Image (cartoon, rainbow, N blue to C red):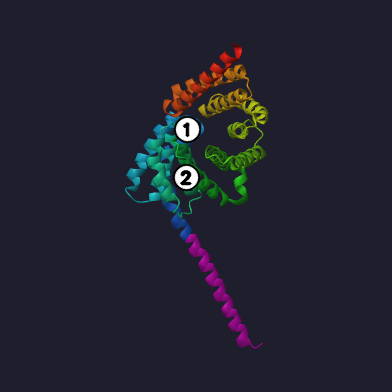
Amino acid sequence: MSDKWVDFLRYLALIGVYVFGATILANLVLRVRRLAPTRRTLAKIPEYALAWRALSRGEYAEGLDLAWRAYEECRELTAGRRRNALACCEVLLGTALQEAGRHEEALVYLRPAEATLAKAREYDGGIVRGAYGAGVLALAESLSELDDRAEALAATERALHWHVRHGRRRHSMPSYHAALYLHGRELLRSAQVTEAARAARTALEARRATTSDPDVIVALCLALTAEIAVANDRPELALPVAEEAVAHSRMLSAAPAAHRAALAEALTIHARVLGALDRPAEGLAAITESVELTRKLAEELPDRYRSALAARETTMADLASSDNERTR
């Protein structure tokens, strides 16, 4: 090969290297530019991170107060710009309202936030993506509490679809396990019992593979599994699972309201199972404890637990009536 061709090939190789390097540099510049807005705005609002921490500890009153302050500060900072940052604060506020049981108010913030974040394309280290996932779960919870079954089920499906984007890593994510549990619960309420059982089993297996400590998601999945067995007219199969749900819930710390709520839910399911097995006296003892727990929770968060208390008091009255008839 002549020197002329060698020089020509060397020239082409240099052009290729320069083009490749320029492409990488351009992508890095674009990522940095996209990274800046949301992260930079939220870094100026210390209440944002503090509110999420308070909610994770079950301190809902403090979390709600911090969330309101973060939202107001973000509105002032953005002034209609950097919509993703404001949407993240809307998710935070909507989640705090949902945890407090103010579901209709929560939807006011969660709906527009989800619509905005679903279209976001920022490289922000996961802030926007994480806010979207949290927002969809909170939206599903609020819709479920408001008895909007179709939309609640659709929201859980969107939450699961979002987690699938994370690939195999999703199997160790608590939010994925929570989404599976919520999906199973909504499937059961929509009378799709077989699909609900599959979702509950998947959630339980995934969560237990991640942690061996007492866990609120495990407790809720066990209670849901027992409820599904009752819906399948198999209370004899539901009984050991319901007993395990109660035992597991008792191992949880009683400090967070969510843990006490899980125990109250497990006791309620246990009472229903015992009632279905024609053991109303034992069922009455379980539902009485559940009602006592729920009353205390309703004193702390009346908006969230008032309806649950009414439903459990009705169950207690029914079991008391059955027990009286049995003893006559």
Q: Position of residue 74 (x, y in %)?
A: 36, 43
Q: Position of residue 93 (x, y in %)?
A: 41, 38
Q: Position of residue 163 (x, y in %)?
A: 55, 48
Q: Position of residue 16 (x, y in %)?
A: 56, 74
Q: Residue at x 34, y 39 (%)?
A: 72
Q: Nearer the viewer, residue 284 or 59?
A: 284
Please name the predominant secondary structure of the magenta segment in the image: helix
Decide whether residue 4 is among the magenta residues. Answer: yes
Question: Mark 1 vs mark 2: which is more N-terminal?
Answer: 1
Helix, strand or loop at label 1? It is: helix
Helix, strand or loop at label 2? It is: helix
Q: Nearer the viewer, residue 289 or 63?
A: 289
Residue 155 appears in view: yes
Q: Is residue 109 above or below residue 306?
A: below
Q: Is residue 68 left or right of residue 123?
A: left
Marks 1/2: CA–CA distance = 16 Å
Task: List the residue tagged with mark 1.
Answer: 54
Q: If the image is split into quadrants, where does the C terminus sit?
A: top right
Residue 49 appears in view: no
Disc 1 residue type (three-letter): Ala
Residue 221 location, quadrant: top right
Label 2 Cα crowd, 10 Å radius (few <14 / some 14-19 / many 20+):
many
Residue 200 location, quadrant: top right
Q: Is residue 177 left or right of residue 129?
A: right
Q: Residue at x 45, y 51 (%)?
A: 118
Decide whether residue 85 is among the magenta residues. Answer: no
Task: List the residue tagged with mark 2.
Answer: 131
**Given contact means CB atoms under 8 Å apart, are the residues at marks 1 and 2 in contact?**
no
Q: Which residues are magenta?
A: 1-29
Q: Residue at x 56, y 72 (%)?
A: 17
Which is closer to the viewer, label 1 or label 2? 2
